[in-house]
Image (cartoon, rainbow, N blue to C red):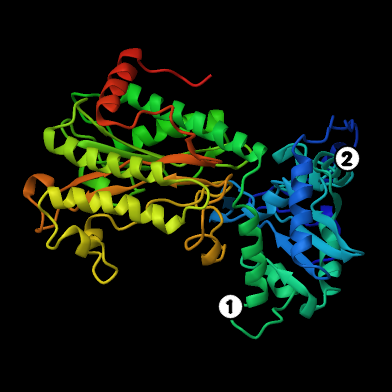
């Protein structure tokens, strides 16, 4: 870790000019310093509660949670920075390179956020560095950030010394986000997977399983924007001619950037046979009237909580009888899963509920080579040829939230009130699959909604979009009638 001052680490480019001294002297004076009007964020107490819960899980140990660094896109350009999910969950900070350190103190921990101070006009960095304020805009001082987030802050330049003081046997690090931090605090455990550090990641994931009221509101905001995005796309989708998948992707992205931070993940816009490719993100195809269009898209709110919604629509406006039959099987599966969700029900049991309905539908289509019961047997599961993924996943500040949670508390665990998860069964008949009739080849259907587990069942947070085949047809017609719109 560098110990040098904040403002001497300026990023410069080979094409930057060599300024004459007269110009440098001229740039160094005549600037007014305006303080930001900073107030504490209303959600700041939530971050403090999460840090306190994490503190309780690891008494007497130092905990280190980095956010990560900017990533190079090409040469001297970076991808837009998106903070590490666990870091922002515990701090609310969205700037790169930050590191949260929880140090044991008395019966708990003292939390310190190490972050870059602003490149103020006190040094040449403010105009000579590509991360200087004349290039990227005004940034918070350490004090301003502390006041806004309700956490003690310290200069990033002091981080190296702080990490050097950590005792490896009493320190846990959230690894894989910041190589400099990983090198500064060597793993204590000889296990290559670093069990101690993995336990820290699991603890944070399990804290995220139950959403508080503020988080649910953030998710609803992202989902409502996603509903508007799907409407935007439907309004420009022609019934009688093809349009590029990337046009539809771009229309949704406009909504995501206007009403939120960005898309929460790479949008899947699958026309025709592309709908059968589960993670089709190239979006290089063209819609075809008479075929289906599968769109898996979600807006990420400015708080970084994301929606994850899928709809499959008939481009022409009306499902063919066979398309409707497949769609209705998937819809019945999704509804059965939603009906099964309530506190205490096993996550895996919801999966089995959805899968049985799909297997029964495949049997009705004449595709299963065995009975439904045999197909559902753990020794067989042949029905999964046409539905490779599970029924859903946790949702929150990550599209696949709580990934590091232990199996017994997630995949093999029971649902609890406050969980938010997707329900997204699907059927996919590959165009080269010789075990299905020709008219089914290239047909893919997925329906995905975001649901909140309530005290007595679940609430569909994305019910602003229709789900049944008849409702989808009516919705698509209504959107087309309304015509295109620009986000406000």
Classify mark 1: helix, strand or loop. loop
Which of these two is toward me, 432 or 393?
Answer: 393
Quadrant of the rendered structure where residue 156 is? bottom right
Q: CA–CA distance between discs 1 and 2? A: 51 Å
Residue sitting at x 65%, y 55%: 207
Of the image marks 1 and 2, the number of the one nearer the N terminus: 2
Tell me if mark 2 has few (under 14), some (14-19) or many (20+) residues whose alpha carbon lies within 10 angstroms of its own: some
Tell me if mark 1 has few (under 14), some (14-19) or many (20+) residues whose alpha carbon lies within 10 angstroms of its own: few
- Residue 73's tag is none
- Residue 28's tag is 2
Disc 1 or disc 2, which is closer to the eye? Answer: 1
Vertical relation: 96 (above or below) 305: below
Q: Which residue lies furthest to the left in this view?
A: 438
Quickly name the residue at label 1.
Answer: 193
Percent across and percent down for residue 343 are: 53, 48
Residue sitting at x 86%, y 61%: 108
Percent across and percent down for residue 487 are: 50, 21
Classify mark 2: helix, strand or loop. loop
Percent across and percent down for residue 354 are: 33, 50
Q: Is residue 14 among the parts visible in the rendering? A: no
Quadrant of the rendered structure where residue 26 is? top right
Which of these two is toward me, 471 or 79?
Answer: 471
Residue sitting at x 84%, y 29%: 37
Percent across and percent down for residue 426 are: 29, 47
Q: Do the residues labelled 1 and 2 touch (CB within 8 Å)?
A: no
Which of these two is toward me, 411 or 87?
Answer: 411
Vertical relation: 262 (above or below) 402: above
Q: Which residue lies furthest to the bottom in this view?
A: 190
Image position of 281 (left or right of 52): left
Image position of 331 (left or right of 191): left
């Amino acid at each position: 870790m560098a110990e040098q001052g904040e403002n001497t680490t300026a990023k410069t480019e080979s094409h930057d000019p060599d300024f004459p001294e007269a110009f440098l002297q001229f740039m160094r004076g005549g600037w007014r310093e305006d303080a930001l009007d900073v107030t504490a964020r209303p959600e700041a107490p939530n971050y403090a509660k999460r840090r306190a819960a994490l503190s309780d899980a690891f008494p007497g140990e130092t905990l280190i949670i980095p956010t990560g660094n900017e990533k190079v896109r090409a040469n001297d350009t970076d991808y837009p920075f998106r903070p590490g999910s666990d870091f922002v969950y515990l701090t609310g900070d969205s700037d790169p390179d930050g590191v949260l350190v929880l140090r044991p103190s008395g019966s708990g921990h003292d939390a310190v956020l190490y972050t870059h101070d602003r490149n103020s006009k006190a040094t040449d960095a403010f105009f000579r560095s590509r991360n200087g304020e004349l290039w990227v805009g005004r940034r918070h001082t350490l004090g301003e950030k502390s006041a806004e987030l309700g956490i003690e802050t310290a200069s990033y330049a002091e981080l190296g010394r702080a990490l050097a003081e950590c005792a490896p046997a009493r320190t846990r690090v959230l690894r894989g986000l910041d190589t400099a931090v990983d090198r500064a605090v060597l793993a204590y455990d000889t296990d290559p997977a670093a069990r101690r550090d993995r336990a820290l990641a699991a603890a944070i994931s399990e804290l995220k399983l139950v959403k508080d009221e503020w988080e649910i509101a953030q998710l609803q905001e992202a989902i409502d924007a996603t509903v508007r995005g799907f409407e935007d796309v439907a309004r420009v989708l022609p019934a009688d001619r093809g349009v590029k998948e990337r046009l539809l992707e771009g229309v949704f992205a406009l909504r995501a950037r206007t009403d939120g931070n960005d898309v929460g993940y790479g949008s899947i816009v699958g026309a025709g046979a592309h709908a059968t490719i589960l993670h089709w993100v190239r979006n290089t195809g063209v819609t075809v009237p008479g075929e289906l269009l599968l769109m898996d898209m979600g807006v990420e709110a400015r708080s970084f909580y994301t929606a994850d919604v899928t709809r499959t629509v008939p481009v022409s406006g009306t499902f063919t009888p066979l398309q409707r039959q497949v769609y209705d099987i998937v819809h019945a599966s999704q509804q059965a899963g939603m009906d099964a969700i309530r506190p205490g029900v096993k996550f895996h049991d919801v999966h089995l509920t959805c899968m049985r309905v799909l297997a029964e539908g495949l049997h009705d289509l004449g595709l299963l080579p065995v009975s439904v019961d045999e197909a559902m047997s753990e020794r067989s599961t042949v029905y999964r040829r046409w539905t490779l993924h599970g029924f859903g996943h946790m949702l929150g500040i990550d599209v696949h939230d709580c990934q590091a949670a232990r199996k017994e508390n997630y995949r093999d665990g029971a649902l609890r009130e406050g969980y938010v998860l997707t329900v997204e069964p699907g059927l996919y008949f590959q165009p080269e699959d010789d075990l299905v009739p020709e008219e089914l080849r290239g047909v893919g259907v997925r329906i995905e909604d975001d649901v909140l587990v309530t005290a007595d069942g679940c609430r569909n947070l994305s019910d602003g979009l229709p789900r049944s085949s008849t409702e989808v047809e009516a919705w698509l017609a209504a959107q087309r009638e309304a015509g295109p719109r620009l986000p406000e």
